[in-house]
Amino acid sequence: MNSYQVIAHHCRKRERRAQLEFYMMFYKSVYNSCFRILGNQQEAEEIMQESFLKVLNKTELLQEDAVSMEKILKRIAINRSIDCYRKRRIRFVELEDQHASAPDDETEEALQNEIRLEAIEQMMPLLPEGYRMILSLHLIEGMDYAEIAGQLNVAVSTIRSQFTRARQKLIYLIKKHYSHENILSQPNQK
């Protein structure tokens, strides 16, 4: 048994120490997923806590490997974050813009490879909530347009259009705050 499997075994027995270790293994990535969607520290922390409680109270949700467990925790947290977001009564408006088209896979991949992650992370909080959510769900959480549309109860075309606008707004913000030479076409220097 690896360390995660030992922790999961003890979590099934509802041992507090194991539950704390379980929490410590995953809390950062779950919190980050919530925060990227909500943009609010308190709401993100609350939803993160609820997600852990759900899994730890329903031990049948505990998985045998850490990768699967993290995916389940993040999915629960993302769904709860979206529900919280909906409660704010932000509505996506169906926009008919002939100039906004869905990005093709090559363009999207080139864009992701060109812009350094630090610039994106610094500019994401400056985006409107709807744009931030769609970018986070698609680019960071890996959800496709249909999944996002299903979660938000809107048309796929709306998600594509909003994603295109969000991406354009993000690029504008990055170019506005950073010089072109500093952020484009340079490898990540971490």
Image (cartoon, rainbow, N blue to C red):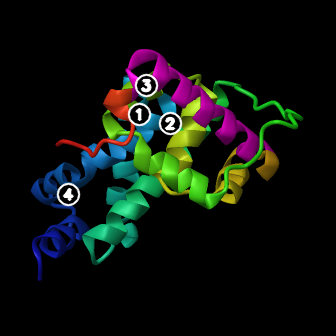
Precedes in sequence: disc 1 or disc 4 = 4
Precedes in sequence: disc 3 or disc 2 = 2
In which quadrant of the rendered view does residue 98 lie?
Answer: top right
State the image coordinates of residue 139 (x, y, percent, origin top left). 50, 49
Quadrant (top left/top right/bottom left/bottom right) for the N terminus: bottom left
Q: Is residue 114 visible?
A: yes
In the image, which is nearer the foreground, mark 4 or mark 2? 2
Specify few, some or many for label 4: CA neighbours under 10 Å numbering under 14, 14-19, or 20 or more: some
Q: Are marks 1 and 3 in contact (CB under 8 Å)?
A: yes
Which stretch did the figure color magenta?
158-180
Precedes in sequence: disc 1 or disc 2 = 2
Q: Which residue is mark 4?
A: 22
Residue displayed at 78% across by 38% down: 100
Residue displayed at 68% across by 33% down: 165
| C-alpha gap between disc 3 and disc 4 | 32 Å
Q: Is residue 142 above or below residue 64?
A: above
Q: Residue furthest bottom?
A: 1
Quadrant (top left/top right/bottom left/bottom right) for the C terminus: top left
In the image, which is nearer the foreground, mark 3 or mark 2? 3
In the image, which is nearer the foreground, mark 3 or mark 4? 3
Q: Label 1's element?
A: helix
Q: Which residue is mark 2?
A: 37
| C-alpha gap between disc 4 and disc 2 | 23 Å
The label number, if any, that marks residue 120 in the structure image? 1
